[in-house]
Image (cartoon, rainbow, N blue to C red):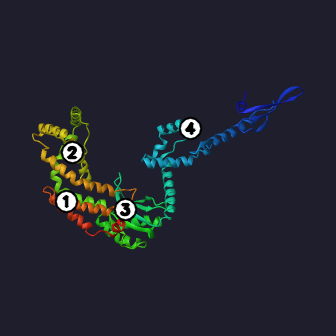
Amino acid sequence: MSKAWDDFKPLFKNVDGKEVRYGAECIHCKHVLTAASSGGTGHLLRHRKTCLGKVEQSARTQTLLKFNRDGSIHSWVYNAEFARLELVDLIVTEDLPLGFGNSKAFVRYIKRAHNPRYEGVSRQTTTKDCAKLFDMRRIKLSEYLQSVSSVALTSDIWSGNAKEDYLSVVAHFVNADWELEKRVLGMRLIDEKHSSPNIADRIISVIEEYGLCAKVFSISLDNASSNTNAMRTLTLKFSAYIGPLLLHHRCACHIINLIIKAGLTHLKPHVESFRAAVSFLNSSNQRIAAYKSYCIAMGVRPRKFCFDMDVRWNSTYLMLKHLLPYESTFSVFIQTHYQQLHGKQLLQEKDWYVANKVFEFLENFYEATNILSGVYYPTAPLMLHQLIEMASYLAKYENDNLLREVVALMKDKFLKYWKDIPFLYSFAFV
């Protein structure tokens, strides 16, 4: 029997008392074709091929029913192009490889658990879709920002994993619902000298792209001299909204970083023994395992200790914060093992006294940095509170025997930037 009858239903009629086949009905499209018993099935096979192609195409865009949150039902149609854009959004959000959508494991997971019609997406297609999604998001953001009355900008330069430097521009603004929002407007490659003209040109190109030149309220940059010089050009370009008086602001957290680093240069000898102790412990996996066993034997929950970094002052604070609760176990373990290996003690009682003093002193500045690093709330109204608190904190310790010279260095740096309170902080405080 011909394969055509797998997809056709034979139709019969009574002729002179006999059942005679006169036609065939397609089980897919219900179309009736002639199919006399004396005829062939070639035309049925041709229709079968065409009809199955249409069925397959229809399956790709098959409409399904889906429940809304309120219990109502709406139609859902699989859209391959939309699925690719959602895949790109996943890849970008989670920092996944561009070829992730075509990996065997991911394709198998989607086909088995979610959508049998899914086809893997090549790396080249994903790359094109990334550019397409970026353009769509940029246009949507540009339209959204047209309803915003003013924006505050922040900008910094970052180094990527490929050792390429990028200048970022971020806009902070209050939306129509009085909610604080921030949006990354652009990341510009800066593959040349970080000079003030190069910095200014890239910031201006980003703001012009979104049509925000007349809406810039303030610009916050760190304290590099090239940024300060770049503000001369940026002030001329962006002073239309409120004038130059409130435009330029130095990053408060960066200033706190400079203040603390000025003091840590004098404190470095006092915390060097703790750096050496942590380095000694972490340099051997057997030593780490031995310390873990010792903590368990002493009824203390074991933990690992991170080494501090010169470029981040708060890493010194965090190193001490994690070490101080383990003074008894860490000190005994390090003294025993370090003395066996080097013939001298590393951590003594006076070192722990200094560590407690330094930790207590740095705590206020660490909290101020966390508060002023906020993203989802305005920080300008908090600035004057934090300035007064840090000034009183420095005054409290300026006569301390251990920290007197440290505080003197920090006060000089504090007054360099904040001797005169910026007008914006005063207005925001009121």
**Residue depicted at x 53% and y 35%:** 112
Q: Say which label, 1 or 4, has the lower sequence index.
A: 4
Q: x%, y% of residue 17?
A: 88, 25
Residue nearest the observer in this picture, 223 or 55: 223
User: Residue flagged by tag 3: what amino acid is it?
Assistant: Ser
Residue nearest the observer in this picture, 269 or 139: 269
Q: Name the secondary structure under disc 3.
A: strand
- Numbered badge on residue 336: none
Q: Say which label, 4 or 2, has the lower sequence index.
A: 4
Q: In front of the other: label 3 or label 1? A: 1
**Residue depicted at x 73% and y 27%:** 1
Residue nearest the observer in this picture, 114 or 427: 427
- Real-space Cα distance between discs 4 and 2? 56 Å
- Numbered badge on residue 324: 2
Q: In front of the other: label 1 or label 4? A: 1
Q: In front of the other: label 4 or label 2? A: 2
- Real-space Cα distance between discs 1 and 4? 69 Å
Quadrant of the drawing holding the C terminus: bottom left
Q: On the picture, is 79 further left or further right than 231?
A: right
Q: Name the secondary structure under disc 1.
A: helix
Q: Name the secondary structure under disc 2.
A: helix
Q: Residues within 10 Å of mark 3 (few under 14, many from 20)?
A: many
Q: Name the secondary structure under disc 4.
A: loop
Residue 240 is drawn in which quadrant?
bottom left
- Reading the image, the residue beneath label 3 is 155
Q: Say which label, 3 or 4, has the lower sequence index.
A: 4
Q: In front of the other: label 3 or label 4? A: 3
- Against 273, residue 208 (above or below) is below
Q: Say which label, 3 or 1, has the lower sequence index.
A: 3
Q: x%, y% of residue 324?
A: 21, 45
User: Residue flagged by tag 2: what amino acid is it?
Assistant: Leu
- Reading the image, the residue beneath label 4 is 116
